[in-house]
Image (spheres, grey):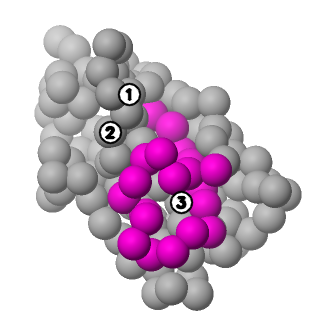
Amino acid sequence: QVQLAESGGGLVQPGGSLRLSCVASGRTASDYNIAWIRQGSGKEREFVAVITRSGSGSYRYYGDSVKGRFTISRDNAKNTVFLQMDSLKPEDTANYFCAAHKKPFSLVRQVGEYDYWGQGTQVSVSS
């Protein structure tokens, strides 16, 4: 099975940028749909972005609250998925997880369908 490890979180001012990394080990990242999912304090988990597995076209989808500000990408040579976050807002403050599955295309936005999870990295947006 695949193991996932996130890094890159931290404290940033509103309007700033951060890039999160999710390194996959044990399996090839491009064989999985890999998503970023966040959970703020006292809130439900929220779908942020996904890049689908190579076999299904490597499509990218975003949650409505981050569309136009966040970009997901994958570096196959590094077996890593990135989340570039620009124009950050205080409401983006959350613990960010990467997660993976090989389920059908129709399930890539469903946070409860992901089988493999990293430990999370905290992002705090505050002045």
Amino acid type shown at disc 2: Glu
Q: Residue at x 34, y 47 (%)?
A: 47
Magenta stretch bounds: 96-115
Closest to the observer, 27 or 1: 1
SS at badge 3: strand
Question: Can residue 103 be seen here?
Answer: yes
Q: Label 2, label 1: how many angstroms apart (C-alpha)?
A: 6 Å
Assess whether mark 2 and mark 3 are in contact (beta carbons under 8 angstroms).
no
User: In the image, is residue 96 above or below residue 40?
Assistant: below
Amino acid type shown at disc 3: Ile
Residue behind mark 2: 46
Q: Residue at x 64, y 38 (%)?
A: 118
Assess whether mark 1 and mark 2 are in contact (beta carbons under 8 angstroms).
yes
Residue behind mark 1: 39
Left or right position of 2 against 22: right
**89 magenta-colored:** no
Q: Residue at x 33, y 48 (%)?
A: 48
Question: How many residues crowd around disc 2 within 10 Å: few (fewer than 14), some, or many (20 or more)?
Answer: some
Q: Earlier in the sequence, mark 3 or mark 1?
A: 3
Q: Label 3, label 2: how many angstroms apart (C-alpha)?
A: 14 Å
Closest to the observer, 85 or 44: 44
Residue behind mark 3: 34
Amino acid type shown at disc 1: Gln
* Residue 109 in which image quadrant: bottom left
